[in-house]
Image: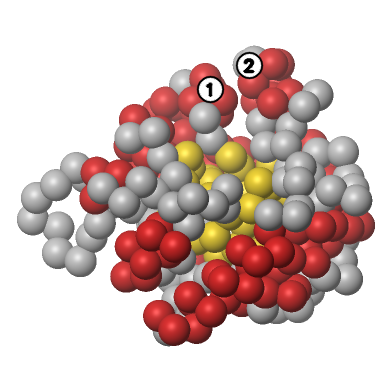
Amino acid sequence: MSRVPMVAGNWKMNGSLASSCDLLEKIEEQSDSIKGVDIAVFAPYIYLPAVCEKLKSSSIITGAQNLCKYDSGAYTGEVSASMLQDFSVDAVILGHSERRHVFGESSADVAEKVKIAVAAEITPVFCVGEKLEERERGKTEAVILEQMNAVIDLCGVEIFSKVIVAYEPVWAIGTGITATPEQAQEVHAYIRGLIAEQNSSIAADLRLLYGGSVKPDNAKGLFSMNDIDGGLIGGASLKAEDFISICKSAID
Ligand code: 13P
């Protein structure tokens, strides 16, 4: 097994141009000395040109937080995969729970986006996760299965050789309540198992990130679990020191 861990910062709709550049400079200063983990930042669209320019000769991966499922046309307010390609954006978060539950994206929408991103050679960080009430009703696996199957049915399981999956339980996002390493591991093992049923080598190489209130003091416990290959970090990615500390937790 040779999965390189990844720690990715999802900046969501936070910061200003000045604060984003400042944050990036601080991350960049230290990231060069951290080997053995892929570091990524997912910036708001409007700051992506500046972020891409700053990171041109850096190993930090640049990502967007969404893309449109259509190529071009009368889709006011949307951004296409080819527009992201213009700035050499490497990756894109798709199906984040805030997109699913605040903006009403369906699993079918998300699957189409995954397909279009892979066709454009932009790596999707495809998010899945259950709400609290779904967990309490014992529906966690059923929810994850539906979200995963939407992509498998549209694209075939082979697409997961080009996709990173992030398990983000909705009840842990921005709440300060983190899934325990055991709770997260259980779902990660379930996701890897789903892929393994159809293709064991894709499953073995699939990178699975955990997201939901990851902080410097809980990252190591989570990242040390067998099927957790790093994290997708919200709030703590906005503080360079915390983010760097979390990146280091993925390797030591
Ligand atoms: P928090 O780390 O703020 O809980 O956010 C997690 C997340 O949604 C990352 O995509």
Looking at the image, how many numbered discs can be counted on the residues? 2
Residue lying farthest to the left in this orientation? 74
Residue at 76%, 46% in the rendered image: 35
Above or below, 26 against 86 in this view is below
Marks 1/2: CA–CA distance? 7 Å
The color scheme shown is secondary structure
- Mark 2 secondary-structure assignment: loop
Secondary structure of the residue carrying numbered label 1? helix
Task: Give percent across and percent down for residue 174.
Answer: 65, 76
| 63 to the left or right of 214 | left
Residue closest to the eye, 63 or 135: 63
Residue 149 position within the rendered picture, expressed as x and y whole percent measured from the top left: 52, 33
Marker disc for residue 230? none
Answer whether residue 141 is visible to the viewer in this image: no
Determine which quarter of the picture holds residue 1. Answer: top right
Q: How far across and how far down the image is residue 186, in percent?
A: 83, 44
Name which quarter of the figure residue 113 lies in: top left
Decide: few, some or many residues near mark 2? Use Cα within 10 Å; few <14, some 14-19, many ≥20. few
Which amino acid type is shown beneath numbered disc 2? Gln
Measured from the top left, where is residue 209 in percent x and y? Answer: 69, 48
In the rendered image, which residue does mark 2 sit on?
A: 198
Residue at which label 1 appears: 157
Q: Are marks 1 and 2 in contact (CB under 8 Å)?
A: yes
| Type of amino acid at the residue the image marks with label 1 | Val
